[in-house]
Amino acid sequence: MTSFSLPAVLTHAQASATAQALVAAVQAQTSLTIDASALQQFDSSALAVLLAGMREATQRGGQLQVQGLPDRARSLAQVYGLSEVLQLPPVPA
């Protein structure tokens, strides 16, 4: 499975370009692992980027796995009800 790394900063200002790059990566390789371990500064736009990638992978019959997503981002995904859609593991207690 090919890997796509998210940047350290992923807010509204970076979301469009990052989403375009992720969608292009999914178009080139439908089975993709997203490495989110570098992500340090983000807002809900980061989740929108992940959803764009997931949507593209689903349309192409591919797979997308998210690894290394910080606990704070996983908590945000839970609040928005996106944990299952993004197939994220639960946030540790």
Image (spheres, rainbow, N blue to C red):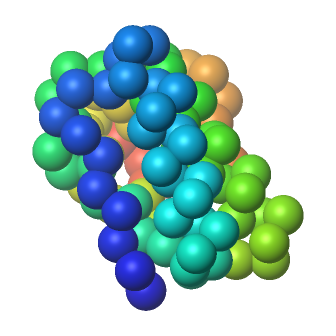
Task: Name above or below for residue 24 compared with residue 52.
Answer: below
Res. 23 image quadrant: bottom right
In the depicted view, which residue is nearer to us: 63 or 92? 63
For residue 10, side relative to residue 87 (left or right) = left
Res. 71 image quadrant: top left
Task: Find the residue positioned furthest to the bottom.
Answer: 1
Give the tally of numbered discs: 0
Query: Which residue occupies 22% across, 26% down?
Result: 9
> The N terminus is located in which quarter?
bottom left
Task: Name above or below for residue 17 compared with residue 60.
Answer: above
Query: Which residue occupies 15% across, 45% down?
Result: 38
Residue 7 percent across, percent down from the top left: 24, 40
Q: Is residue 31 visible?
A: yes
For residue 16, side relative to residue 69 (left or right) = right
Query: Which residue occupies 58% across, 75% down?
Result: 28
In the depicted view, which residue is nearer to us: 78 or 40? 40
For residue 36, side relative to residue 45 (left or right) = left
> The C terminus is located in which quarter?
top left
Residue 36 percent across, percent down from the top left: 28, 49
Residue 32 percent across, percent down from the top left: 49, 73
Q: Is residue 76 visible?
A: no
Query: Which residue occupies 35% across, 72% down?
Result: 3
Res. 70 image quadrant: top left
For residue 66, side relative to residue 64 (left or right) = left
Task: Name above or below for residue 2 compared with residue 87.
Answer: below
Residue 48 percent across, percent down from the top left: 58, 30
In the depicted view, which residue is nearer to us: 65 or 79? 65
Task: Find the residue positioned furthest to the right.
Answer: 59
